[in-house]
Amino acid sequence: MSLLLIAELDQDSLSPATLATLTAAKTLSHPIHVIVMGASPQKAAEEAASFDGVERIWMVEDPHLAHPLAEDMAETLFELAKGYEFILAPSTTFGKNLLPRLAALLDVALISDVIHIQDQKTFIRPIYAGNALATVTSEDPIKVLTIRPTAFEKAPAGAGKGKIESYPFKECSTPHPVFVKLEASPSERPELTSASIVVSGGRGFQSKENFALLEALADKLHAAIGASRAAVDAGFVPNDYQVGQTGKVVAPTLYIAIGISGAIQHLAGMKDSKVIVAINKDPDAPIFQVADYGLVADLFTVLPELTSKVRKVS
């Protein structure tokens, strides 16, 4: 039996989360097939074919997939998925939207947010905002898994020669949502979930205008900007900046938390970062329990000084 990896695309290429999912797929020691779906997925299919361990790429091309919806993709995947023992996708908005629907169609359980694959039937996933780990054993004939990208390294580029084959698109036959428009905020900063440096701010900034202090530091470090839920709810920054259990999960090389107390839901989204630096005037703030380096100080005093002494990253 083989394994099917459903690729998430970042414009015309495979997303970093897909590359992390590929690393997880390799631990299952099954032949890996990748399905790439889009309006013009040829480039992404060729990229997938170049990775070691990938034997076959199913390429589904159709204008309906310019902005793919789970309803459109699930209809096409349903028959194909029956021939596989494992179905994997990244645990991102893409995978969390698609795989529950596909698992329901296949009448099997979904095992979400897997951080470790113990064996062919046993998987480990976090629960209670990451405060506990659940070991899940599945006897289903088809194991449907979403993989937490921050738990696995991205698969390195290889010299594979996977075979690319076309697969027909099946349009959804039932009433379903349709894509209307995409509203995106253009930014020269790195994307939050793939940035190597993330600078996050919390309610300690007190206002939207004060976030300019954090933006100045992020610009010098060429870092992505994140925020706690409290800062987002207060209207300091947009929703897509939120890091945490109900926001985005990140694991950068360096995470700088400024004015963030460290609520459980926020820690669940960033505690896998390689190095964590915390700046907070409250010495008892929970963020210091996970920080590698902590500074108890007023951010309005420290942040301008820190920014002035940081050499700009090119």
Image (cartoon, grey):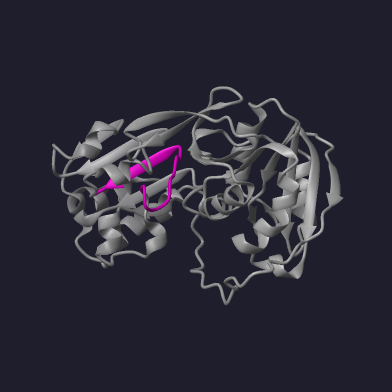
Task: Using the image as rendered, state which of residue 16 and residue 280 is in the foreground.
Answer: 16
Task: Using the image as rendered, state which of residue 88 and residue 157 is in the foreground.
Answer: 88
Q: Indicate left or right for 303 with 25 as reference.
A: left
Identity of the residue furthest to the bottom in this view:
180
Q: Residue at x 79, y 53 (%)?
A: 59
* Placement of 174 over or under 24, stated as above or below: below
Coordinates of residue 131 in the picture (x, y in percent): 31, 33
Task: Using the image as rendered, state which of residue 154 and residue 83 is in the foreground.
Answer: 83
Count of numbered circles in the view: 0
Q: Tell me which corner region of the image, top left, top right, bottom left or bottom right, holds residue 37.
A: bottom right
Magenta part mainly helix, strand or loop?
A: loop
Q: Quadrant of the N terminus?
A: top right
Tell me, yes or no, whether the highlighted magenta stretch contains residue 197. no
Q: Residue at x 41, y 39 (%)?
A: 254
Identity of the residue furthest to the top in this view:
119
Q: Which range of residues does the magenta coloring cover? A: 244-258
Coordinates of residue 268 in the picture (x, y in percent): 35, 41
Q: Residue at x 24, y 45 (%)?
A: 263
Q: Residue at x 85, y 47 (%)?
A: 164
Coordinates of residue 194 in the picture (x, y in percent): 52, 47
Coordinates of residue 238 in the picture (x, y in percent): 37, 65
